[in-house]
Image: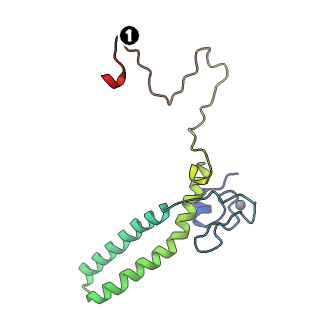
Amino acid sequence: MAVNPFVSGFACRCPNCGRGKLFTGYLKVAERCEACGFDLRAADSGDGPAVFIILIVGFIACFGMLFTEIAYRPPVWVELLVWPLIGTVLCLALLPPAKGLMLAMQFQNRASEAGGADVAPVIPVVPGAGAGPTVNPLAPPQVDLPADTPPEHER
Ligand SMILES: [Zn+2]
């Protein structure tokens, strides 16, 4: 049975079996899953998790700062002490699950960042569905143009 990428990702577990640890350090991905031996060396989330966390935590911190300023009017030094601290703690706490989720999604979708091929979805062939030519429903429609139509780059 396939592992839910949200469950294994948020728990920082192997995207293949959902049991082995994904990280050997704070954010360092293990080379292999300790439980199933799944090869994790191709895992590369880039800066994707950091971007999401910056946007999410930035919204929370800015909204919180504006809300407390309008609702309670605390001294400025309190705002400058509390919200950067909350933002830093939230970023550090949310980065591992965000990276785990992104890696799990990459492995599940066979993304090239996880060693996959980024292939188009396979179109099932229905036996006996007709003797005509096979038509790819994802391809752009074919338009019959008159014979004297100039090439596309000259139109
Ligand atoms: Zn595993």
Furthest residue in direction top, as rendered: 147
Q: Position of residue 13 (x, y in %)?
A: 65, 65
Q: List the residue tagged with mark 1.
A: 147
The quarter of the image that holds ligand 1 is bottom right
Q: Reply above or below: 75 against 136.
A: below
Circle 1 Cα neighbour tier, 10 Å, few/some/many (<14 / 14–19 / ≥20): few
Quadrant (top left, top right, bottom left, bottom right) of the C terminus:
top left
Asked if residue 75 lies left or right of residue 142, the reply is: left
Q: Position of residue 106 (x, y in %)?
A: 57, 53
Furthest residue in direction front, as rendered: 154
Q: Nearer the viewer, residue 74 or 93?
A: 93
Asked if residue 9 lies left or right of residue 55, the reply is: right
Q: Reply above or below: 134 against 67.
A: above
Colour treatment of the image: rainbow
Residue name at image x 49 percent, y 28 percent:
139
Q: Reply above or below: 50 against 141.
A: below
Type of amino acid under label 1: Ala
Indicate yes or no: mark 1 CB to ligand 1 under 8 Å: no
Residue name at image x 61 percent, y 51 percent:
108
Residue name at image x 58 percent, y 17 percent:
133
Residue name at image x 44 percent, y 78 percent:
88
Where residue 150 sits, quadrant-wise, is top left
Total numbered badges shown on the rendered structure? 1
Instruction: Give the secondary structure at mark 1.
Output: loop
Q: Reply above or below: 26 against 14.
A: below
Where residue 145 sits, quadrant-wise, is top left
Asked if residue 70 lies left or right of residue 5, the reply is: left
Asked if residue 129 lies left or right of residue 57, the reply is: right
Q: Position of residue 148 (x, y in %)?
A: 34, 11
Q: Position of residue 2 (x, y in %)?
A: 67, 52
